[in-house]
Image (cartoon, grey):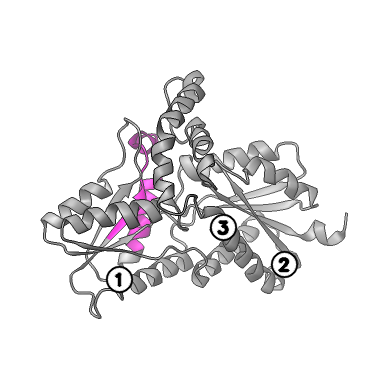
Amino acid sequence: MPETRDKTIGVFLLNLGGPDSLGAVRPFLFNLFSDREIIRLGPSFMQKPLAYLISSLRHKKTEGFYRQIGGRSPILEITTAQASALEESLNGSAQAVSPARFRVFIGMRYWRPFIGDVVPAIAQEGIRRVIALGLYPQYSVATTGSSLSRLQAAAAGLPLELHSVLSWYDHPLYLDALTERIREGLGRFTDNHSGVHLLFSAHSLPKKFIDEGDPYADHIKATVAEVVRRIDVPWSLCYQSRSGPVEWLEPSTERMIGELAAKGVRNLLVVPVSFVSDHIETLYEIDILYKSMARGLGMRLERVESLNTFPLFIAALGDIVKRGIKEAGWVE
């Protein structure tokens, strides 16, 4: 094995994934609902049968949503671009951290490339140290926790030393990137932003998870608190993407839009605060569904551009990786 491979540090970006075609929607939904860490369907032995039933019942409707955004999720292309930009950024300053070079990989929880398929490939390259970084700023057992559990299972027995970054909801450069994106969004209204209301919309979570100690809601609130300290604009926090007959985090985005319209708000800037790349929640739910709802209520709704490959966001990821290397004690 070449010595350079021994010194290479792998960076593994973890994400949920999304269907890459209409034909992938049904198996994607089955994989999603089969994960008991994200949603619990009855007793454990019924998880997969119920996941099969739900995916069978819902896939046609969900395919209709994906047809409206191009017939597939763009999350693979975006995450691949994020990985490429991060690898270039890290290798440009690698000597400032350690003699190691960096290789950035991506793995998805519910669709290709699956985490379980990528982990052996990392080991086969001769890489022995891996920083695992979930592309979820705020920790939840349903996102970061589930992805890291799958990573640990896939790495069992392989000669890999893993260091996981659990959350980065309060990282200064991440907050700077989110704030800058919001300022760009405000610029689409008026010079003084008069009358614009910021609507932070996070992916919802069953309330039971929070009651059991999941820190997700606290992390979301902490992120929002830091951002609004930097921008003096009226704001609200809500949650989107609910499914299933359980109690979810409140208020819902739909309800909040209605309440703000009743209060006379006419200009809404939606901030997808828990998302770092475009996918169905931004491109369909916000850009199509919520925008249409707001228009019907006499409101103008715009969305903050997703972080995607925004240079300040890539810089944030790079700094998170460097901090992780120091925490792991891999700086020589």
Q: Secondary structure at mark 1?
A: loop
**Relative side of 196 to 155, left or right:** left
Q: Categorize mark 1 by other alpha carbons within 10 Å: few (<14), some (14-19), many (20+).
A: some
Measuring 11% from the left and 57% from the top, which residue is drawn there?
Answer: 263
The residue indicated by pointer 3 is 77
Q: Secondary structure at mark 2?
A: loop
How far from the left and from the top, in percent, is residue 321? 60, 61
Q: Earlier in the sequence, mark 1 or mark 3?
A: 3
For residue 151, say whether it is visible.
Answer: yes
Residue 238 vs residue 62, the one in the foreground: 62
Instruction: Give the position of the C terminus as an image quadrant.
Output: bottom right
Measuring 68% from the left and 52% from the top, which residue is drawn there?
Answer: 130
Identity, as a three-letter code, of the amino acid under mark 1: Ile
Q: Earlier in the sequence, mark 3 or mark 2?
A: 3
Q: Which residues are magenta?
A: 199-226
The residue indicated by pointer 1 is 231
Give the label, 3 or 2, closer to the camera.
Answer: 3
Q: Secondary structure at mark 3?
A: helix
Marks 1 and 2 close (CB-CB < 8 Å): no
The residue indicated by pointer 2 is 98
Q: Marks 1 and 2, how far apart in space?
A: 37 Å
Q: Quadrant of residue 237?
A: bottom left
Measuring 53% from the left and 40% from the top, which residue is drawn there?
Answer: 23
